[in-house]
Image (cartoon, grey):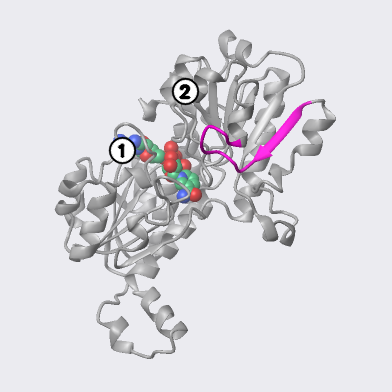
Amino acid sequence: MAMRRAAASALRTVSASRFSATSPLHRYLHASPGSKKIVGVFYKANEYASMNPNFVGCVEGSLGIRDWLESQGHQYIVTDDKEGPDCELEKHIPDLHVLITTPFHPAYVTEERIKKAKNLQLLLTAGIGSDHIDLKAAAAAGLTVAEVTGSNVVSVAEDELMRILILVRNFLPGYHQVINGEWNVAGISHRAYDLEGKTVGTVGAGRIGRLLLQRLKPFNCNLLYHDRIKMDPELENQIGAKFEEDLDAMLPKCDIIVINTPLTEKTRGMFDKDRISKMKRGVLIVNNARGAIMDTQAVVDGCSSGHIAGYSGDVWYPQPAPKDHPWRYMPNQAMTPHISGTTIDAQLRYAAGVKDMLDRYFMGEAFPPQNYIVNEGKLASQYL
Ligand SMILES: NC(=O)c1ccc[n+]([C@@H]2O[C@H](COP(=O)([O-])OP(=O)(O)OC[C@H]3O[C@@H](n4cnc5c(N)ncnc54)[C@H](O)[C@@H]3O)[C@@H](O)[C@H]2O)c1
């Protein structure tokens, strides 16, 4: 209980440090009256749409806000068609006021699209991670970018724990044997280990990284973390993880490395050939943060040579990943489409968060400060 309280208080501190959202300029940005054109870009569910009444994160579910928006006189267009000059999204760019996007089926909001979007005021991310938006161009255009901070952090941390166990126990080859009618214990056990006693390092120990460390504690691992910011000593002590200021000094110590930073100018391509060569031979890597934090070919080469013994994650660049993306075909991978943060529980939370921000936008009120990624022409501190 004490640990939970301390974690919550630490999260509040991180949140509060992003922005103060009460200046007159901010209110001005949110105070234009009248009917709005709102466009949402989500993944399509097709035959799965009707299988769960809480499946709100897809085109068909439309975040469950259609009736609410239309009853107030707003126009709400929802599509999954986001690429190329003739796509549905492109048709609405010139006159939309609000664009809701999601990392699971990212509509890439380029500088060119921002320039064309003369009425655009607000970019909302249904989920966490707004790197599919050109944030500098959004700031220069005076747009507000906000996400539903915290909405799916438990979903992702749980998924990371699952991926760690899948890799450590060499689970997938056993599953494939069963499907293929085979039985070969040695084919799995020659490289299956216990998690206990292994060194796990998270690169990034914000909301998701901390939840993962808390979940790993009962497994009796040696826990390390690297971040821009050292945790408060009491929280660090409760979580039981040691701070590593120098990333390159942490990497050779880790049996398992988990990536938990946003994709920023500083983290793009952070794990290139050189960084991967600093890791232990036989390292396992879990990356649910963003695909572009890794150098694509360096990961393929590491998996092919055996330097990386297993790579698992749900994030790719671009998304959807093309059929010929090399991570689909490299050895020792346990990749999935981008799913960890879009459980039904997560969808309900980020749909509620989007609705809350739209409501505040219509009323000219500020958003919860931790949600802002671009506000009053400035980027949140970790994106600078
Ligand atoms: N796969 C999914 O479904 C999914 C869902 C949610 C979030 N994510 C990704 O996970 C990321 C992290 O989410 P979060 O909620 O934990 O965010 P957060 O802001 O709470 O934590 C991010 C942490 O990374 C640290 N950081 C940032 N830049 C760094 C750098 N250059 N070097 C070292 N540390 C750095 C920050 O200090 C912070 O502690 C998101 O930005 C998003 O890209 C993925």
Let me know if residue 76 is in the magenta part: yes
Residue 123 in the image: state x and y as whole percent.
57, 27
Farthest right residue?
71
Q: Is residue 43 depicted above or below 280 in this figure?
A: above
Q: Amino acid at mark 1?
A: Arg
- Residue 74 versus residue 320: which sits nearer the camera? 320
Residue 316 in the image: state x and y as whole percent.
40, 49
Q: Amino acid at mark 2?
A: Glu
Q: Is residue 255 depicted above or below 266 in this figure?
A: below
Residue 328 in the image: state x and y as whole percent.
37, 61
Tell me the tag on residue 306.
Answer: none
Q: Is residue 354 left or right of residue 114?
A: right
Tell me the tag on residue 268.
Answer: 1
Give the prevailing secondary structure in the magenta stretch: loop
Q: Is residue 81 left or right of residue 137?
A: right
Place residue 212 in its image quadrant. Answer: bottom left
